Amino acid sequence: MIEDLQFDREKKVLNFLTRKFGPIAFLQPKTTDYPYDSWYLRSIGEQLALLTVVTKRIKIQIEIHPRFVKLVEMPQPELKHLLNKEMHPGILLMELSKCGLHLLP
């Protein structure tokens, strides 16, 4: 049983009281950001494109290079470890999913 549930949106902290000790999980639907509000794909250089996906909660910008992609211009501190890292597209999507951003259903 969970009591006194409080969520601080700014700090992104969830506080609660419980009388039983055991495994606890916060579950989020994989379709939280569906449908997308909008998306744009545009050329920003020779063999370089920028994909912008606007969801209900966040705006994601991904640079697309011939051999890799990288996440750019994300102010969220939860995503700083992914910023400007060259990755395979599937790896980037998997890492974003680990952070709670499920871009594929």
Image (cartoon, rainbow, N blue to C red):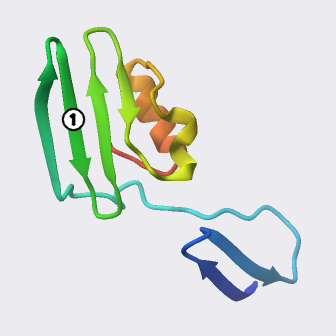
Q: Is residue 14 left or right of residue 93?
A: right
For residue 27, say whether it is visible.
Answer: yes
Up/down of 28 relative to 81, above or below: below
Residue found 32% across the figure and 9% down from its top: 67
In the displayed image of the protein, which residue is found farthest to the bottom? 4
In percent of width and height, residue 43 lies at 11, 25
Residue found 74% across the figure and 81% down from its top: 16
Residue labelled with disc 1: 51
In percent of width and height, residue 82 lies at 51, 34
Up/down of 53 relative to 7, above or below: above
Q: Quadrant of residue 70?
A: top left
Depth check, front residue: 96 or 105: 96
In percent of width and height, residue 48 lies at 20, 18
For residue 105, say whether it is visible.
Answer: no
Depth check, front residue: 29 or 85: 85
Up/down of 83 relative to 88, above or below: below
Up/down of 72 relative to 74, above or below: above
Q: Quadrant of residue 12?
A: bottom right
For the residue carrying disc 1, how many other residues have a C-alpha within 10 Å: few (<14), some (14-19), or many (20+)?
Answer: some
In percent of width and height, residue 8 lies at 61, 78
Residue found 67% across the figure and 85% down from its top: 5
Residue found 47% across the figure and 43% down from its top: 97
Q: Is residue 26 left or right of residue 23?
A: left
Depth check, front residue: 46 or 15: 46
Q: Identify residue type, mark 1.
A: Leu
Report helix, strand or loop for mark 1: strand
